[in-house]
Amino acid sequence: MEASRPPRARSRPKRPPRASDADQRERLEKFAELSQEALFIHEEGVIHDINPAAARMVGVSPKDLIGKHVFTLVAPESLNSAKTQMDIKPTEPYELLLVRRDGTRFWAELQGRSLSWRGKTLRVVMARDATDRKRAEAALHDSEALFRQLAENIKEVFFVRDLRENRMIYVSPSYEEIWQRPRQGLMENPLDFVQSIHPDDRAAVLDTLRRQAPGDLFRREYRIVRSSGEVRWIRARTFPIMNAAGEVHRIAGVAEDITDFKQAELARLEHEKAQREALVREVHHRIKNNLQGIIGLLQYEMGGHPGLREVIQDTIDQIRSIAVIHGLQSLTPGRDLLLCDVVPAVVSAVCESREPRPQIALEADLPRSLKLLEPHAVPIALVINELVTNAVKHAPAWQASIEIYLEQQAEGGRFVVRTQGARLPAGFDFRTGQGLGTGLHLVKSLLPREGVTLTITQKDNAVHAELGLLPPVVEPLSQPD
């Protein structure tokens, strides 16, 4: 048997030679020199070393700082904060106001770590110049403060909405004063304000909002109803806010209460309307008086020209019919002439000009809901005058031989003159103009092209003239008197 061999010792991996303290310090110094960040190394506040970046930051050479306390770099107003940081040794960043050698001050952001060195505990502090950031923050703070001072002290509602998240970023306090609704509701739901819009305006506002593209301007006036029932007028407008990429990412807007303006405008319009109506009333009154003067002159001349009596009388009747229209318009300027007022007035005017006064039976079955539009008022009054005058001329001498009816028919009215005992001439045809006298020729020329029909026929022992009036000559009133 072979003798057993002793077991071999296992080989262990060689450890790298431990760097000397000098080597470690050299490496640390090399790293500090190459770092772009300012580095301070201190022990309980006494500076052991700084790198070139730190020296440039405070404007002092390293040799002038080594051995001095770090508090010599701290501005008096930050000294208490610096002492606190020294005591608690935080690892989170903090800020101090530092002083350069030339006396200029600057804000620095500092962050420290503890380091064991030859049995000592050193503190390595990295510093960054925070002057630009602090200046930007201060400018932003001032800007925000100015914005809030403006937004929260103007009477108008100012708001900003984020499009991507569809939420309100800001709503000024005046919203609660004008809408009398809490701002929180609008912050949670950007369309909360719609609940207060007047029912007659809400659909139009929502339609505008639905069709609005992100970059479109919104300009609209609408009414809101407060919880008390009070109605207020609002003028709202929005404008886009672009981001750095030129994209619309927010919408800013202003809404103002224009109720006082609207009321003043309404009062102004009412005043102007009253002035216009007074002027129109005076003009119609003067025209009527002038026409009456002309009638008086014609009546005077009629006595000296017996052969022209009938012609002059017809002219007087026509002028009097025109005067009737102006008389009615002088009484109700700016209002529509009602057919049920015009017809009796013209018939009465014809009767008053005749001696002896003709006996006419007028039956009006027409509600006060059909207006005679102003452009057609004078022509229709002349047509009615001629139809009644013709009936008076050709009616037999017995009483109640003329019957006039005024009735409602479909969307218009029907004016009928029935002359008992009268007869049309042979071959009479109103449509072709056959057998027409001077008066009916005038009637034919006065008839509007649309909205009017006129038939003149012989029915048994009576002449039947029927005038049909439809839109656009007459029109139903939206609100009957």
Image (spheres, rainbow, N blue to C red):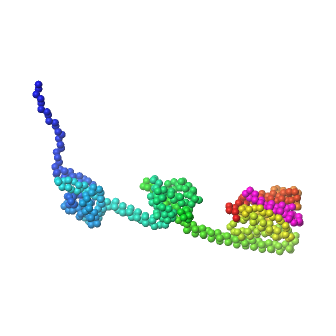
Image coords of residue 229 (percent x, y): 56, 64
- 315 sits left or right of 196 in the view: right
- 406 sits left or right of 32 in the view: right
Q: Which of the 4 image quadrants contains residue 6?
A: top left
- 171 sits left or right of 355 in the view: left
Along the line of sight, which residue is nearer the eye, 74 or 88?
A: 88
Whether residue 299 is visible: yes
Along the line of sight, which residue is nearer the eye, 65 or 148?
A: 148
Is the N terminus in the top left, top right, bottom left or bottom right quadrant? top left
Q: Residue at x 24, y 60 (%)?
A: 87
Image coords of residue 286 (percent x, y): 73, 73
Is residue 152 on the magenta stretch? no
Is the C terminus in the top left, top right, bottom left or bottom right quadrant? bottom right
Whether residue 128 is visible: no
Image coords of residue 409 (percent x, y): 75, 57
Magenta span: 392-420
Is residue 412 on the magenta stretch? yes
Q: Residue at x 25, y 62 (%)?
A: 83
Image coords of residue 442 (percent x, y): 80, 62
For the view shown, which residue lies furthest in the top direction? 1
For the view shown, which residue lies furthest in the front direction? 228
Along the line of sight, which residue is nearer the eye, 95 or 297?
A: 95
Q: Residue at x 80, y 69 (%)?
A: 349
